[in-house]
Image: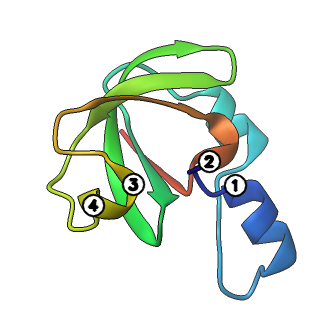
Amino acid sequence: MDFENAQKMKFLHPEIFSAPSEEELNNIKKDNYVKVSIADERFWILVTKVEKSIIHGLVANKLVMTNDHGYNYKDNITVSTDNVYDIQN
């Protein structure tokens, strides 16, 4: 199962979906939070490392659809900047 591509969703449905700009994505740093989506569940990741367009982190909130996607609170997770719907410092 793949994470949703936030940039693609923003392009296809700009009236419904938003996503950060390229500049904002390039400024993601350790200890930021990024919001992603998989299996119709959106959740936050605490960023632990950024390597170009790859973000490593920990699931930062309790999830309700674990049976669908397999992720749990505090799991290590890796996503692309294309998967990011929101950023919090």
Tell me: 20 left or right of 12.
Answer: left
Pointers 3 and 2 in contact (C-beta within 8 Å): no
Disc 2/disc 4 C-alpha distance (Å): 21 Å
Identify the residue position indicated by label 1 in the image: 5
Disc 1/disc 2 C-alpha distance (Å): 5 Å
Q: In the depicted view, which residue is nearer to us: 33 or 24?
A: 33
Q: Quadrant of residue 4?
A: bottom right
Residue type at mark 3 is His
Looking at the image, tell me whether mark 1 or mark 2 is earlier in sequence order: 1
Identify the residue position indicated by label 3 in the image: 69
Residue type at mark 4 is Asn
Residue type at mark 1 is Asn
Looking at the image, tell me whether mark 2 or mark 4 is earlier in sequence order: 4
| Disc number lying in front (2 or 4) | 4
| Disc number lying in front (3 or 2) | 3
Q: Position of residue 39 (x, y in %)?
A: 47, 65
Q: In the depicted view, which residue is nearer to us: 65 or 54?
A: 65
Residue in the image at 36% along x and 32% along y: 32
Identify the residue position indicated by label 4 in the image: 67
Residue in the image at 68% along x and 15% along y: 52
Residue in the image at 70% along x and 54% along y: 5
Q: Residues within 10 Å of mark 2 (few under 14, many from 20)?
A: many
Residue in the image at 24% along x and 32% along y: 75
Pointers 1 and 2 in contact (C-beta within 8 Å): yes
Q: Is residue 58 above or below residue 85?
A: above
Looking at the image, tell me whether mark 1 or mark 3 is earlier in sequence order: 1
Identify the residue position indicated by label 2 in the image: 83
Residue type at mark 2 is Asn
Disc 1/disc 3 C-alpha distance (Å): 16 Å
Pointers 1 and 3 in contact (C-beta within 8 Å): no
| Disc number lying in front (1 or 3) | 3
